[in-house]
Image (cartoon, grey):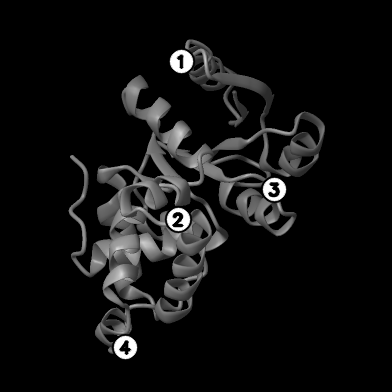
């Protein structure tokens, strides 16, 4: 069972998201809150496996709430947004968010995003990928060292990165490459170091920018 906390300042949005997620036998909405400032406390109370986080909230926004939650060792965050502001989206990547989906997405996509992120994968909606890449390319992370970092990866690390970029968890990567999950974890840590990426989302943005995978339609 995937335990989900919904964070959005609009009660009607929380209700709609809850109806979609509760329709699935493997998803349970265990809590709600209306501001990012309440997230860390609410997570400690209801112990979710995943937080679905709005970006725009009046007191503490979703980016800062994500940063606080990740610093506290909390569960993964899937950002839900109505717009594609590249600076805000990249800030959410930098804060440690693992998923990015539009509020206008189909219920099927929302459910898939929740399952992917909860299982340890990363999900980036194809519509939001462009703005995130634009911001990435304007940042200090997109440098002349870009190709050197890519060339430093072994063939196996490239295989792992491609599957990671498609949203696969370490367990799923291990199954597809016929490796032990501990070996996959080692490869993931090594490629993080080689790419200068702090987490899966940043590594995946690199993979898309390098053309290793094509955006999902």
Can you say which quadrant of the picture contains the N terminus? top right
Residue 56 relative to residue 169: left or right = right
| Comes first in the chain, label 2 or label 4 | 2
- Residue 84 has which mark? none
Residue that label 3 marks = 74
Of labels 1 and 3, earlier in sequence is 1
Q: Which type of secondary structure does the marked residue at label 2 adopt?
A: helix
At mark 3, the secondary structure is loop
The x, y position of residue 36, in whole percent, is 67, 42
Q: Where residue 118 sits in the image (x, y, percent)?
A: 53, 38
The residue at 18%/53% (across/down) is 214
Q: Who comes first in sequence, dot 4 or dot 1?
A: 1
Q: Mark 2 and 4 residues: CB-CB less than 8 Å, in contact?
A: no
Disc ID at residue 20: 1
Is the Cβ of the residue at disc 1 closer than 8 Å to that at disc 3? no
Q: Which residue is mark 4?
A: 145
Give the Cα separation between the discs numbered 2 and 3.
Answer: 21 Å
- Placement of 190 over or under 179, stated as above or below: below
Q: Nearer the viewer, residue 29 or 89?
A: 29
Pointer 2 residue: 88
On the image, the x and y values in percent for residue 35 come to 67, 36
Mark 2 or 3, nearer chain start: 3
As measured in the structure, the alpha-carbon distance from the residue carrying label 1 to the one carrying label 3 is 24 Å
Residues at badges 4 and 1 in contact (C-beta under 8 Å)?
A: no
- Up/down of 217 relative to 144, above or below: above
- Nearest to the observer: residue 98 or residue 42: 98
């Amino acid at each position: 069972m995937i335990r989900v906390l919904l964070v959005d300042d609009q009660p009607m949005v929380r209700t709609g998201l809850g109806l979609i997620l509760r329709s699935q036998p493997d998803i349970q909405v265990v809590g709600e809150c209306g501001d990012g400032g309440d997230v860390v406390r609410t997570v400690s109370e209801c112990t979710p496996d995943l937080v679905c986080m709005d970006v725009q909230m009046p007191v503490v926004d979703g980016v800062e709430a994500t940063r606080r939650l990740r610093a506290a060792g909390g569960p993964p965050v899937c950002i839900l947004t109505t717009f594609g502001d590249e600076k805000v989206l990249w800030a959410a990547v930098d804060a440690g968010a693992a998923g990015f989906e539009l509020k206008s997405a189909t219920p099927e996509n929302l459910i898939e995003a929740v399952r992917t992120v909860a299982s340890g994968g990363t999900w980036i909606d194809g519509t939001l990928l462009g703005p995130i890449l634009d911001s990435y390319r304007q940042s200090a992370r997109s440098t002349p060292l870009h190709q050197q970092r890519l060339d430093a990866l072994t063939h196996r690390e490239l295989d792992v990165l491609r599957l990671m970029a498609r949203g696969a968890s370490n367990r799923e990567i291990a199954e597809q490459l016929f490796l032990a999950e501990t070996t996959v974890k080692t490869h993931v840590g090594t490629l993080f170091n080689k790419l200068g990426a702090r987490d899966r989302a940043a590594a995946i943005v690199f993979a898309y920018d390098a053309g290793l995978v094509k955006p999902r339609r």
